[in-house]
Each structure stands twice: as structure tokens, then as C-alpha cells.
Amino acid sequence: MSAPVRRTGGRSAAVLSSIRFAVEELVRERGAEKVTIPLVAERAGVNPTSVYRRWGDAATMLNDIATYRLDPTRELPRTGDLRADLIAWCREIVEHYRKPINAALLRGGSASAGEQETECLRNRRAEGLAIAGEAGALDADDIIDGLVGPIVYRAIFLPWTLDEDLPVRLVDKVLAA
């Protein structure tokens, strides 16, 4: 008798997917500040305890969903040309936050983070260090202060300024310093 074939994902993945979709819909409809766990659970068709068990509170949930939208396991640019790789990476982040739902999730996640560093910020720092740290060209502060910070600031406060040339300007400025 052979061992049963294990499904990857299964019900747990389906529940998580429905919760993420519900959060995105509710943020789009009501704004991040009005999203609650009971509302998400109702929209997702799950018991609120399923949501509380995973996240504990709405702030943590929003932060996690915002992080999920920019997949931390995706392939990073690695052509060997530091400038080109950083521009490609920044361009990906800019394009991501040019979508209103992603900017709204970022605003909600960052507003709810309080004095804690968000998972999204930790992921972007690690990515930037993976690209630039190997060359010894930049440290974590250079990446956050010179690249990620200006993009996030614009996504939150000046979304219309997230233009196609922004990544080039930021990378050139950081590398020239």
C-alpha cells in the first residue's frame, strides 16, 4: 500500500487566499483604517477565530497582507551590473506601488506598525543587501534611506510622482554618494 499523496496548500491555502482577497476588497472599498477582523472573516467566509489565530489583530494582518503583495521569494535582478540590478529592483517596487490597492495596503500596514519595523521593510532591506551588499557598494542605511524610503514616501504621500524615471534618479544619486 502506498502512502497517500499529500496536497500542497489544501484547505489552509484556500482559506489564506480568501482572507487576503477579502482584505484587498475591503481596503479598496472602505480604506485600511476601517478594516476589522470580523469584517474580513465575514467577507472571506471563515470564522473570525481563524483570522485571529493567524494574525492576532487587524494591524498585524494588514502589515502581513501588504508584505505578501510584493513576493519576498521572487527572483531578484542579478546580472552582475550593480546599477542595472538596483534600477530593475527599484522599478519593480515603484510599479508595485503605482497600483492603488498596493499603495493603500502599504499605508494601512505602515500606519498600523507603530514603532515596530514592518515585515515589508525587513524584506526590502534584505533584498537590497542581497543585490548591493555582495559588491560592498551599499549598506542597509544606504538602501533604506536612498532607495526604499523615497519610494515608500512617494507611494504614501505623493503617488502621482512615482514615475518611470524615479528608479534611475534614486540609484544614480545613491551610487554617486
Image: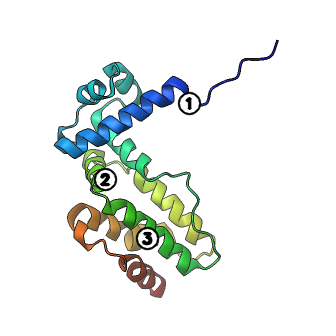
Q: Quadrant of residue 158?
A: bottom left
> As drawn, is 103 to the left or to the right of 172?
left
Q: What residue lies at 36% left-to-right and 32% top-to-bottom?
A: 19
Mark 2, other Cα within 10 Å: few <14 / some 14–19 / many ≥20: many
Residue in front for this viewpoint, 78 or 45: 45
- Find the distance from the CA under tag 1 to the CA under tag 2: 26 Å
Counting from the top left corner in percent of width and height, residue 94 is at 37, 67
The residue to which callout 1 is attached is: 9
Real-space CA distance between mark 2 and mark 3, rounded to the nearest whole angstrom: 17 Å
Q: Residue at 41% of width from left, 76% of height from top?
A: 167
Element under disc 1: loop
User: Label 1 amino acid?
Assistant: Gly
Look at discs 1 and 2 and give the one toward the viewer.
1
Eyeballing the image, is 66 above or below 51? below
What is the number of the mark on residue 97? none
Extreme-top residue of the structure? 1
Local crowd at mark 1 within 10 Å, few (<14), some, or many (≥20)? Answer: few
Which mark is on residue 91? 3
- Badge number at residue 106: 2
Which three-letter amino acid code belongs to the residue tagged 3? Arg
